[in-house]
Amino acid sequence: MQQLFTIAGLTWRAALRFRLFIVVAVLLLAAVVGLPLLIKDDGTARGFTQILLTYTLSAITALLGLSTLWLSCGTLARDIEECQMQMVVVKPIARSQIWLGKWLGIMSLNAGLLAIAGAGVFFLLQWRATKLSPAEQTVLRNEVLVARAGAKPPTFDKEIEQATSDELKKALERAPVTPAEVPVLRKQIKEGLKSDLQNVPPNYEQSWKLDLGFAKNFIRKQPLFLRVKFNTAVKSPSGTFDVLWRVGVPKETAYWQTPTPMSLAPETFHEFEIPPDLFDENGILTVTVMNPNPVSLLFTTEEGIEVLYREGGFGLNFARGLGIIFCWMALLSAVGLAAASFLSFPVAAFASIAALMLVFSAGTLSTVVADGTLMSYNQETGQRGYAPVDWLAVPLFKGILTVINLAKGFSPIDALSAGRSITWGELGRAFGQIVLLLGGIIASFGIWTFNRRELASVQSNQ
């Protein structure tokens, strides 16, 4: 451990000598303090939070990410190119200890910078909250500056998949289609079956049962919030539709019902408070939608209906969110050091940033994987074409997307700005998947290549 801490200390000295720590700290504080002052919010609790949390934490993540890649590439590659590493490796210290010591030094730098920036965001958030109106402050404390968990209706995925396979088999027996058209037909059948569970026809009602699980034991006497979103096939002249709500089951549980219809816009999230203790003894909350409109309302299983309840305070939730960002930095530092283990500084920095850009292209990759082809829809025929390289590209993109989702599947910034709970389990999974699994694989590769690298050949090329 003494050797690791020595290398980590040398990394700190290099960062301070080149003013990197000071420059990044100033940029982070400028993003935390300056960005909310330059961009005005709309005076609401949610608009206020989007400015202070979404934008500032995104800026912090971007600045820390780029500086981490730059430092991790430079601290190892520069030491090799300037022949300083050749003087270190002759000491009684293993190359793996040098590599890990560099990583430890970079991560301790990131911990300090993230703590400074995170503290700035937290205290600025508390101070700026006092400038809101009393009503908006209440909304802020109950719906945003809080850690809320949620429960959704069951999706019945297995049942739908089985029913889809059965219906597809029957459809192919009635009218065979080409192999290229089978995925499209399967998707159409599946969407039709899902629609039966999600659709509320005109002048009908539909009920969903949400299982609160263990939370039923600690949310009694606490208000709950419904978060809803629906879609329609027809637009309303006013832009809104009337929706009646009933929560609970009459004669079985306490229940609440809207006295008059709510006028809600489609394709938009709406959140409103409902009374506490409307669930039964098993923690099942029944939500019923009554549709008085002449058109159907579609509440998807993914986003349609969700009940939110308080699970904890904001401070600890914010710290766990910063912990996930710290895990991202750990992975980026491993990527930069691994690239610098066998590449020169410019090439290592270019390769690391290119890998980062690939992460930002995950949306395009997921579209290709979902469609099963690189081709786009033909506007004339309404059908999707297929490229000869699909047999290679689609599995490759699927594998890349799986790896990316291991790290990108956690969204602390979105969760914090929406008042969602980031659990200890989620932080543990982030550490396991991002740091131990992905970071461990990349670190093993970096250490292996660094152990095999001929440093004398680098010196001879200078």
Image (spheres, grey):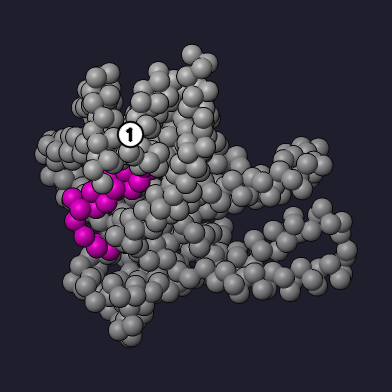
Q: Nearer the viewer, residue 324 or 209?
A: 324
Above or below — where is 257 with respect to 57? below
What residue is at 33 percent from the left and 83 percent from the top?
282
Q: Is residue 385 visible?
A: no
Q: Is residue 315 visible?
A: yes
Q: Nearer the viewer, residue 386 or 425?
A: 425
What residue is at 33 percent from the left and 34 percent from the top?
91
Which residue lies under the disc numbered 1?
91
Is 119 positioned to the left or the right of 443 in the image?
left
- Residue type for callout 1: Lys
Above or below — where is 303 with respect to 59? below
Q: Residues within 10 Å of mark 1 (few under 14, many from 20)?
A: few
Q: Is residue 324 magenta?
A: yes
In the rendered image, residue 368, in percent from the top left (x then y), is placed at 66, 44
In the rendered image, residue 316, in percent from the top left (x then y), is placed at 20, 53
What residue is at 36 percent from the left and 37 percent from the top?
98
> What span is colored magenta in the figure?
308-331
Q: Nearer the viewer, residue 271 or 63?
A: 63
Q: Mostly what secondary structure, the magenta segment?
A: helix
In the rendered image, residue 407, in percent from the top left (x then y), is placed at 45, 48
What residue is at 38 percent from the left and 32 percent from the top?
89
In the rendered image, residue 432, in percent from the top left (x then y), is placed at 39, 56
Is 96 positioned to the left or the right of 296 in the image?
left
